[in-house]
Image: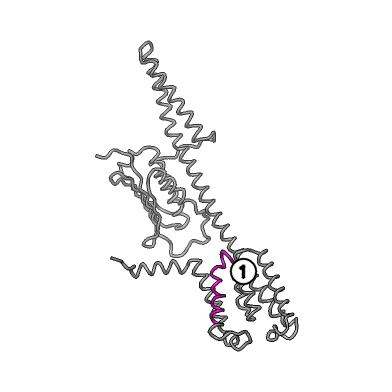
Amino acid sequence: MLRLPTVPALRRCADRWAVSPRALDVVAALSAFGLMCLDVPGLARADNSLTGVTATLVLAAGAATLVLRRRLPWVPYLVALVLMGWLHELTMIQFALYSIGRYRGRRAAVAATLLYVGVAYALFQTPGWPARHGDTLSDFLSLVVPIGVLAAGVGIAAYRQDLVRALEVQRREAVARQAVQEERISVGRDVHDLVGRELTVLAVRAEVLAVRARGESHQKDFEELADTARRAHLMLNETIVRRADREAATPGLEGLATLAVESERMGSPVELTVATEAKALSPLRQAAVHRVVQECLTNAAKHAPGLPATVAITVEGPDLRIEVRNPLPRTPPDPAPVSTGTGLFSMEERVTSMGGTLKARREDGGYAVTALLPTGLATR
């Protein structure tokens, strides 16, 4: 049985289509057609073998080519030149020149404008053509030239604005990628500090056992185990640290109290709750918790200075839940806080790299960040 789409589904489709480039092209075509329809009575009376109906159909066909103005802007431009020479119609050329400037840039718009003025001058020399557009060349050009130059100029300005917006989007994406890359490097260094220490301990223990087992059959096995641990440590240095200067390991849950004190010094008191079960997490997961809370409290101090924040670290089954909440001021702080806008990307990268999820949202007059991480602990 065929199921018809519901009203909300149709409304969503209509909303998506309304803001699409295709919808704007259709609106441009309809606008051009509506303006040209004002000339239909005059076209029907002119000596061009057209009636009111046929003139309307010709203008509709010409305006319909504006739907191609993004991919093929020269098509409506050529059609506009034909309408100008045949029906003395100057409305279509304005839309066509704007489209060339908007979607092909300055050089194409200047070339199209010069060609338009040249064609118009040639038509002026045609006997009888410009009778209704001016008795002298100066009168005629005073009407023709401003139309083309203005339309092309507006199109070029819009094209430049599109380029500025595209460059701004690329800049934001580059900054976000850089923040993600820096966070990955930070995570890698944390892995090096935490896992490298364990590998060192393993190598030392294996060497001790090899000495104790001297003369026994499994002495060689302990020596090989020590060599393997040392090689793994060297590979860790080469792969993750990449010969960069090592940073101090990120504090774990024990550093949350220090973050709360620092936040209170900045005028934003913190209510901190840490579940006892969370203290059994691995150092790497504790470092992730510390980084998330640190970024959240920093954002709260910047965007909601003087307002309290709550931090809750709980264990819910196999997951660790990090929740940071703070109210938002009724008026934005003055001056506006300096922010790169990459903190959320960094937090999300660190959490997702461990198989977790992070959500940041406004709710009930405040801001909340919730992160879920696998605890990695055995569940009973």
What's the magenta bit mostly, secondary-structure-wise? helix
Q: Position of residue 374 (x, y in %)?
A: 34, 43
In the image, 58 versus 291, the foreground residue is: 58
**Mark 1 = which residue?**
155
Spot the residue most to the front.
49
Q: Say whether residue 157 is visible.
A: no
Residue furthest top as drawn:
215
**Hey, which quadrant is residue 252 in on the image?**
top left
**x and y, in percent, of residue 162 in the image:** 58, 63
Q: Is residue 19 left or right of residue 38?
A: left
Q: Position of residue 5 (x, y in %)?
A: 34, 67
Q: Amino acid at mark 1?
A: Gly
Q: Nearer the viewer, residue 189 or 143?
A: 143
**Where, quadrant-wise, is the N terminus in this rendering?**
bottom left
Q: Is residue 1 above or below residue 359?
A: below
53 is higher (above) or lower (below) than 230: below
Q: Secondary structure at mark 1?
A: helix
Left or right for 122, reference 304: right
- Residue at the (64%, 78%) spot, across then down: 84
- The residue closer to the viewer here, 365 or 21, is 21
Q: Residues within 10 Å of mark 1 (few under 14, many from 20)?
A: many
Judged from this view, the residue extending furthest toward the bottom is 45
Residue visible at 40% across and 25% down in the picture: 202
Q: Which residues are magenta?
A: 56-75
Left/right of residue 158 with respect to residue 134 in the rendered view: left
